[in-house]
Image: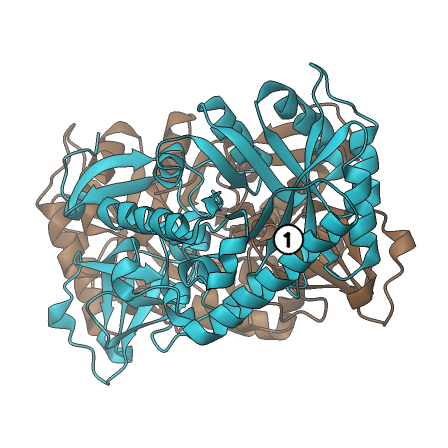
Chain colours: A cyan, B brown
Amino acid sequence: MWAGRRMEELPSPAFIVDLDVAKRNTQRMRERCWELGVALRPHMKTHKTLEGARLMTGGTQRKMVVSTLAEARLFADGGFDDILYAYPLPFDKVEECAILAERLDAFHVLVDSPEALALLKERPLGKDKRWKVWLKIDCENNRAGLRHDDPAALELAKAIAEGTTELSGIYAHCGNSYSCQGVPEIQSVARATTVLTLKFMDKLKEASVACDVSSIGSTPSCSRPVPEMAKLTEVHPGNYIFYDVQQMMIGSCQLEDIAVRVLTRVIGHYPHRNQMLVDCGWTGLSLHSLGQLPTGYALVEGHADLRLVSMTQEHGRIESTTGKLDFAKFPRGSLLRLIPYHACATAAMHPIYYVHSQGHVVETWKPVRGW
Amino acid sequence: MWAGRRMEELPSPAFIVDLDVAKRNTQRMRERCWELGVALRPHMKTHKTLEGARLMTGGTQRKMVVSTLAEARLFADGGFDDILYAYPLPFDKVEECAILAERLDAFHVLVDSPEALALLKERPLGKDKRWKVWLKIDCENNRAGLRHDDPAALELAKAIAEGTTELSGIYAHCGNSYSCQGVPEIQSVARATTVLTLKFMDKLKEASVACDVSSIGSTPSCSRPVPEMAKLTEVHPGNYIFYDVQQMMIGSCQLEDIAVRVLTRVIGHYPHRNQMLVDCGWTGLSLHSLGQLPTGYALVEGHADLRLVSMTQEHGRIESTTGKLDFAKFPRGSLLRLIPYHACATAAMHPIYYVHSQGHVVETWKPVRGW
């Protein structure tokens, strides 16, 4: 019902995606990986839509990462395959993983403990299949994974490669790239993660554990790759389809690469406190910058002098950074575009994405939610 | 498919509602209002479900407040009526409001500017109906509304009461009660808001502007009412159906009144950094305490010594507040219950609520999202 309409007609708050920018972002990441000589296994967690997945896989509909089984089911039902559920195997979800593994050509799971592996061994797959299992290693990111230099990691890799399970790959997430500022810092994390991962691959080889695939990821590291990454098999960034203010501040992208906005309207003028209200609260944006940006919770596109100072459930308070707010410039009903700090978090608040090209809606995308 | 199952069988993360506690909370608020002699017009923004609305309206299915038109449509379609859309009339939504106003016995809108009123006057309702319009006044809360002592407020009230619009009521939100600590502070805000609202009602009377209805609200003020509130016509709290840690810290409720939890499972042990991971990140909880609680982003029920120190999209990191984490007490796959800081924000992250009584699922509720 929205296709062909002008963006200005959309009900606000609205999550809008510039299709041309998103296409360019996904195209560039493919080219970057091609030049580097590594495969791209894009992560779907940011958008969680079939349409976004088609863009990110370049139409092959193969080779992807998901963060939830809800995503896995969406993509499996939508004709996608070679899906890696890159999450420490949750003990309550083994049976559901087995069903997907039996149904798809390649549904991969990930473990970082012998206990998780034992659960897989206790539930052999039908159809003469073996579980495709990735080992998660932690290369100084300090979230999931066995430490790269922990002897237990090599032991677990060996155990995965035996019997009813096979070692599909080694997975490291360089989430520590999110605390970087600027390209040199990003590249330093990317290099360190790559070197540690490759060192682990060497150990596997020395121990005669068959494993061809190594994968690292994060949008900062894959947007600013280092030559060492060419020795990896694949990479798995996700946020880059949209990018956001956080990525821009880290150094992953430029302002013009950010494909998403929240469209909001002015709903009230309060001159006695030099403030106006907009119809976007935390249900439309999330609290993810924690208000720490110089412009508050977001950037207001084209208005560097505006600051989104606070949000409640459905209201946002906007002030001027330079003193007096010029209310005449922002009549009630007028539109502003908020550039989100964290696109994954903002997208997660919206049941529909309005996708436009040059200001006209061309598609709507419906993300999957839940687990 | 979940009814009758034990909570321990639910897939995590899961938003769970204790039906007995929610019923008791809604029953107590009805009794409190009855004793006070004011009508209760409960706010639906916290849960956004038909089932929650039935509990809050005591089965009458009449008299409620909503924060979005998506809620209004849900309740109108579900057989509810007398719905107040208590949000500064968004200029893009007038036609949709008109359709609801023509369809329902009583669909009320709210304004705080002559410009918004003008839009209503330009779009008279069919079926010989007049717009039911509330005036929002600001009694020191500093969000929407004309200031209670602004002469423009009285002028706008007069203009509403003329022609194709009628003045249905005067609305004040004492959101400033959220910065209170303890019952005396809550009651001081409740009293101040009540007194200012009643003063405004007197002004209307003096000016011969017909208006019988005055309404203030917020869960803190209505959970700890002051006798002066008896002179109001109605109150409009919302969060109290669930309550949460924030309300407990403000002084609105006790721990045993909090009806909601997020069920989460341990997914990994990382003894080298004295941390475990759970399968609840900000998609399952929101970031709303900003980690400022002594226990981090939530309370972990029954484990005052655990702290949820950080969250990413699907992971939560838990540490011990007392030193060494006893991993043997929390095997992988074991369940923890997080008590949310802000129930409205946590509920907003979940496509389904699992509603239980004494540990057995009795219903599932599906909230409406969007606008």
Chain assignment, label 1: B
The secondary structure type at the circle numbered 1 is loop
Horizontal side of A252 relative to B304 (left or right) equals left
Which residue: 45% across, 75% down? A184
| Residue A86 vertical placement versus B201 (above, below) | above
At label 1, counting other C-alpha atoms closer than 10 Å, the crowd grade (few under 14, some 14-19, many 20 or more) is many
Quadrant placement of the C terminus of chain B:
top left
Residue type indicated by callout 1? His
Residue A121 visible, this orientation: yes
Horizontal side of A263 relative to B286 (left or right) equals left
| Residue A228 vertical placement versus A369 (above, below) | below
Residue B234 visible, this orientation: no
Which residue: 60% across, 38% down? A85
Q: Give the residue at the far top of this rendering.
A: A127
Which residue: 29% across, 35% down? A364
- Residue A131 position in % (x across, y down): 70, 29
Say which of A161 and A122 sits in front.
A161
- Residue A215 position in % (x across, y down): 57, 49
- Residue B27 position in % (x across, y down): 64, 42
Q: Give the residue at the far bottom of this rendering.
A: A323
Which residue matches tag 1?
Answer: B315
Say which of A18 and B350 sits in front.
A18
Say which of A323 and B214 sits in front.
A323
Quadrant placement of the N terminus of chain B:
top right
Say which of B124 and A304 sits in front.
A304
- Residue B331 position in % (x across, y down): 85, 48
| Residue A109 vertical placement versus A173 (above, below) | above
